Image: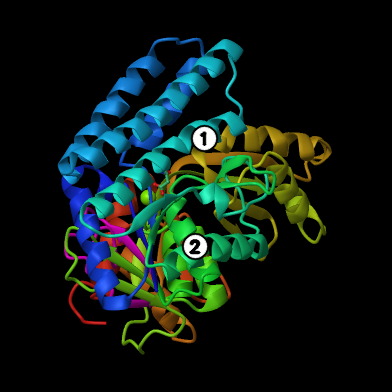
Amino acid sequence: MIVMKFGGTSLGDGESINRAVDIVIQTLKDKGGVVAVVSAMSGITDTLLSAATSAAQGDGESFRRARWSLSDRHRLAMTEAITREETRQQLMEEIEALLSDFESFCRSIHILGELTARGSDAVVSLGEKLTARILAAALRDRGERATAVEATEVVITNGRHGSAAPLMDETREAAQARLLPLLAQGVTPIVTGFIAATKEGVTTTLGRGGSDYTAAILGACLDADEVWIWTDVDGVMTADPRVVPEARTLSEISYAEAAELSYFGAKVLHPKTILPAVERGIPLRIVNTFNPSKPGTLIVAEPQPSELAVKGITSIEGLSLVTVEGRGMLGVPGVAARVFTAVAQEGISVLMISQSSSEQNICFVIRQEAVERALTALEMAFETELARRNVDRIWAQNEVAIVAVVGAGMKGTPGIAAKVFGALGKHGANVISIAQGSSEYNISFVVDEADMEDAVRYIHREFRLGRSGC
Ligand code: ASP
Ligand code: MG
């Protein structure tokens, strides 16, 4: 049995929905069983979110307009994907019922003048509920047995609205109880991605882009043979093809490599997707709905041995490098702990850390939008040290980017770092800070945002990632 997830562009209009239907039918023939997980149509989650946000800010009109544009888009897709009048009629009623829920939610939010995380989850969950019903109906229209299933019945999480964490034991039990009988009867469940519920049944969401994660969670809980992520690119690539035109699709990579690449900005996979797959050793496959005959990228524990020490290069921009420096920090235990406690208490996540062994300088990278909060928190935490000059300066450099060079084969292979930094040196690209984790799967460094794309290109070329096979 295969768990397959269709992303927003793979369900973006009637034509795409028809393509998804073909894929499900073909896989049923080839593999016997399918559980499909769906995202909202591309752009819909953003529309829902901004309608709810503007309602909270006192706008009583936008959400009404949003309702009609949501209705138009889903109606149009439905008429393109479904031919039988009876199926259309019934589906239209379901769609209108969900949209009327949307309007009532927004009206309450408008009256209250406040959008809570819980309320936001309730509103954004509608996008996936719409596509699940449309895909299920489209399959039935083609003579298959299929039914839409709310993930609130099968994925159980804690109550952290907006980025809830799954409770795997409870989810396993619920998912098996709800989905296995359907599969046994030959009915294909079409499950809403991204959304879930607490034990008490309150709707939560797994974080933006979370329907990949739903697919992996269900794959693990149902012991699927593979989890396929249908998207709009051919798989995981050696670099972003918009930056490096000669970038190639990787045919196989390890879980660890995929995790490093997705944490560091390769946008093919929600980073948390790897975890449930690793736990149960279930292979993940990234495939392109617009190019389904291509094998895509297979992500497994032990990929075929490869010549390539470096598999891919990714980058993230919009970052700030925060530095805490002072001669008085030398040999004083607890400075790093206090730095990161102060940042953590602000709920700011740290992407990369570097400390020179002279101990006079700790620097770390965060998203630029958090920089003011981080600096204020650090100034408060080190007030005494700043006054005594044990800490000389706490400051940030904005508009920087992280470039990450990833590959499991880098472990124990000498000369990789030399090659990476040699390539940059040759072209006069300046490196601001460097970090390599002891897993040796990833060398990351900070550059000025303006140098980021060049840095990726230089390294891609140096390692000949565009040409040699893997
Ligand atoms: N629809 C959700 C989002 O846009 C989840 C997803 O697409 O994976 O974030
Ligand atoms: Mg997505």
* Residue 244 in view here: no
Q: Is residue 179 above or below residue 342?
A: below
For the point 31% across and 28% down, the residue is 70
Image spot of residue 365 (x, y percent): 55, 49
Q: In this view, does 222 lie above or below 339?
A: below
Of helix, strand and loop, which one carries label 1? Answer: helix
Quadrant location of residue 62?
A: top left
- Residue type at tag 2: Leu
Task: Tell me the distance, in whole angstroms, between the alpha carbons under discs 2 and 1.
Answer: 42 Å
Which quadrant: the N terminus?
Answer: bottom left
Who is closer to the viewer here, 226 or 309?
Answer: 226
Q: Is residue 352 above or below residue 279?
A: above
- Residue type at tag 1: Glu
For the point 27% across and 53% down, the residue is 140
Q: Which residue lies under the disc numbered 1?
A: 369
Image spot of residue 393 (x, y percent): 67, 40
Quadrant location of residue 47?
A: top left
* Residue 179: assigned label: 2
Residues shaded magenta: 227-253
Of helix, strand and loop, which one carries label 2? Answer: helix
